[in-house]
Amino acid sequence: MEASDQKILDYVRILSISLQRRNAITNSDIEPLKNLYDAGQAYDCIAKVKQLCGLKLTVIVARIKGYPDKANMVRIFDNFSKQFKYPLYKPSSDEFNDLQRSLDSKKVPAFILKPSNLPMFGTQEFENFRVAFFILEWIIELSFESFTTCVAHEMSHIVLDAMRHPLREDEIAVDITAMILGFHDIFHVGRKSEKGKIGYLNDHQFKIAYDEIIRRKKLIYL
């Protein structure tokens, strides 16, 4: 086994222990989610994914047309803050430049603006908090599975950040978190879209993570 393979197994183990999800997402959860998306209710679909991730805070969704340049992104953020009367978290210069590079690459499907010091998960302060979730318009044209893969990844960022998890800055760990939360079968289909690969796991890493998550689901813990 290669060192990188062991890293994926370790991530699954560490995150499984940290998350300790008791009520796994089932087909009975996925079917109404798909019905919402198929009916063109993408925003309601996002709200449902948030709920399935165990998040009770408010997520305000904004749709971005095209691939805005830096000046337009500043304008979008300012307009968003005024429209929702929401003191939008302002990324640092480095964070903004990283985001703009991702937008310029025409690959980023969505992103969340949130402070690094989110209130702790499970607290009343956390439940009263609001974060801004920006989606690129083109992801609504993706399949249900690819769209949900994008959304579940971003919601998993919130989960790990609010837990102050040591792996919260690792994008591969964020993908694995969404899979552990119950979206593993969605990822299995949705990570490959007509727009290209979605997520940060390569095919080999995904298989290792997927197989280990399935194996762990069959274990009985006393």
Image (cartoon, rainbow, N blue to C red):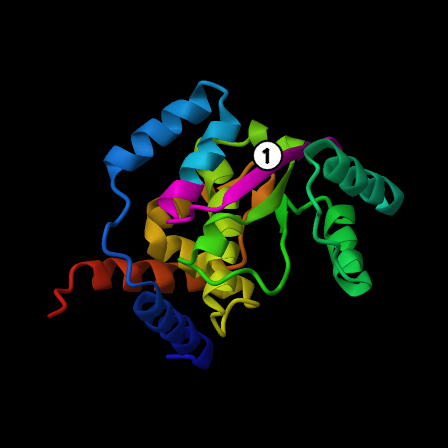
Rendered position, 130 above or below 84: below
Q: Name the amino acid, label 1.
A: Ile
Q: Which residue is mark 1?
A: 139
Please report the residue visible at 41 percent of the width from the left and 74 percent of the height from the top. 5
Residue 189 visible in the shown view: no
Above or below, 120 against 129 in this view is below
Residue at the front extreme, as displayed = 124
Left or right side of 72 for 152: left
Is residue 51 found inside the magenta-colored segment of the image?
Answer: yes
What is the magenta range?
50-66
User: Of all residues shown, which one is farthest toward the top?
Assistant: 39
Could one spot residue 159 in this view of the protein? yes
Point out residue 113 in the picture as x, y percentages from the top left corner: 65, 51
Q: Nearer the viewer, residue 209 or 96?
A: 96
Q: Quadrant of the C terminus?
A: bottom left
- Which residue shows up at 12% across the image and 65% down it? 220
Secondary structure found at label 1: helix
Image quadrant holding the N terminus, namely bottom left
Q: In the rendered image, which quarter is residue 139 located in?
A: top right
Residue at image coords 47%, 63%: 120
Residue 69 image position (x, y, % from top left): 85, 43
Q: Position of residue 207 (x, y in %)?
A: 37, 59
